[in-house]
Image (spheres, rainbow, N blue to C red):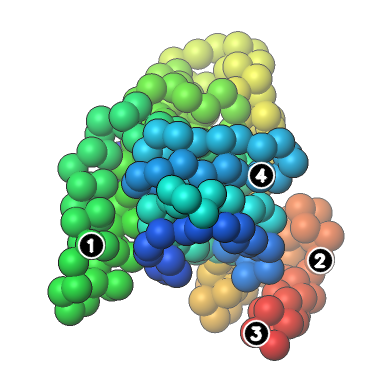
């Protein structure tokens, strides 16, 4: 599999359409659902009051991408208004998954800077304007496609400078990251990963930390524990998970899990279950 498909096969995205139409006035999003947001400004102008509390006026068709839950507001004047298409999104593995964790809090891009997304955007706006049966389901799948194409754009144009997405865009690091993602069960060493990237051990360790923001060993641990968390959410037993993610026994996985999260797998699952119940009430 390619560098992006491998990542998304483990931590795919799911979108839910929640607004299509003209906004006049103020709309507030508190992030309480535990999901990220995608807002598409098709026409008109809108002011984004973002997580950094700075106002950003958008007068051109634009994409607002917030991969994690974030309180923000959109304001459009009563006279002109803003034509919007909006969805929430969540990644498999919860809010701390490796994909969203490697992205900035908020990306705002003009649609004319995203030629790779042009055909999909036309399809989405046409679908939003019509009243065909299955409209909502189609738009949600198109939002998911839009996220994948956005990631492809970010990788191809090297627009992210730290985190795993930046590493996947780096020709020297992408191969070793792909090996980690594909084969977390193997006993990877820094020397082995450096060899995959055709670098010396010392140069690889320095470059990896500079780009990813973690040492290779820390990233390998993070990836394995993220996979373990995803599989725990899916109801898999810790005995089966341990060998899949590179640990010789459930107790070895439990020790690594506690070192990374501060919780045992059992206590972590109780905490997750409690949080999900609270979000539903």
The quadrant of the rendering that contains the C terminus is bottom right
- Mark whose residue sits in front, 1 or 3: 1
Instruction: Give the farthest residue toward the front.
Output: 79
- Contact between marks 3 and 4 (CB within 8 A): the answer is no
Which element is circle 1 on?
helix
Asked whether 241 or 70 is in front, the reply is 70
Label 3 vs 2, first from the N-terminus: 2
Which element is circle 2 on?
loop
Label 1 vs 3, first from the N-terminus: 1
- The Cα–Cα distance between marks 2 and 4, rounded to whole angstroms, is 33 Å
Left or right of 209, for residue 91: left
Q: Which mark is residue 263?
A: 2
Asked whether 201 or 19 is in front, the reply is 19
Determine crowd level at label 2: few under 14, some 14-19, many 20+ residues with C-alpha closer than 10 A.
some
Q: Which residue is mark 1?
A: 129
Tell me if residue 1 comes above or below residue 171 in the rendering: below
- The Cα–Cα distance between marks 1 and 4, rounded to whole angstroms, is 28 Å
Q: Which mark is residue 280?
A: 3
- Contact between marks 2 and 4 (CB within 8 A): the answer is no
Label 3 vs 4, first from the N-terminus: 4
- The Cα–Cα distance between marks 3 and 2, rounded to whole angstroms, is 23 Å
Instruction: Tell me the residue at 60%/17% (across/down).
Output: 207
- Mark whose residue sits in front, 2 or 4: 4
Which of the 4 image quarters holds residue 271? bottom right
């Amino acid at each position: 599999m390619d560098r992006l498909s491998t990542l998304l096969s483990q931590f795919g995205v799911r979108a839910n359409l929640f607004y299509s139409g003209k906004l006049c006035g103020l709309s507030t999003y508190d992030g309480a659902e535990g999901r990220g947001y995608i807002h598409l400004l098709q026409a008109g102008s809108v002011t984004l009051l973002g997580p950094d509390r700075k106002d950003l006026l958008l007068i051109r068709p634009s994409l607002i991408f917030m991969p994690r839950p974030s309180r923000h507001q959109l304001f459009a004047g009563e006279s002109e208004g803003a034509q919007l298409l909006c969805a929430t999104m969540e990644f498999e593995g919860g809010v701390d998954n490796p994909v969203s964790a490697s992205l900035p809090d908020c990306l705002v891009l003009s649609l004319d800077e995203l030629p790779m997304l042009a055909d999909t955007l036309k399809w989405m706006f046409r679908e939003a304007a019509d009243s065909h049966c299955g409209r909502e389901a189609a738009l949600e799948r198109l939002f998911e496609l839009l996220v994948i194409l956005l990631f492809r754009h970010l990788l191809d144009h090297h627009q992210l400078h730290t985190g795993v997405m930046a590493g996947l865009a780096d020709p020297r690091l992408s191969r070793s990251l792909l090996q980690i993602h594909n084969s977390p069960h193997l006993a990877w060493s820094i020397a082995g990963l450096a060899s995959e990237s055709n670098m010396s051990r010392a140069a690889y360790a320095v470059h990896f930390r500079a780009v990813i923001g973690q040492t290779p060993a820390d990233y390998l641990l993070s990836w394995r524990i993220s996979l373990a968390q995803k599989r725990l959410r899916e109801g898999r037993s810790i005995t089966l998970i341990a060998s899949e993610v590179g640990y010789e026994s459930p107790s070895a996985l439990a020790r690594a899990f506690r070192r990374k999260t501060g919780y045992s797998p059992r206590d972590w699952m109780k905490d997750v279950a409690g949080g999900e119940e609270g979000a539903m009430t």
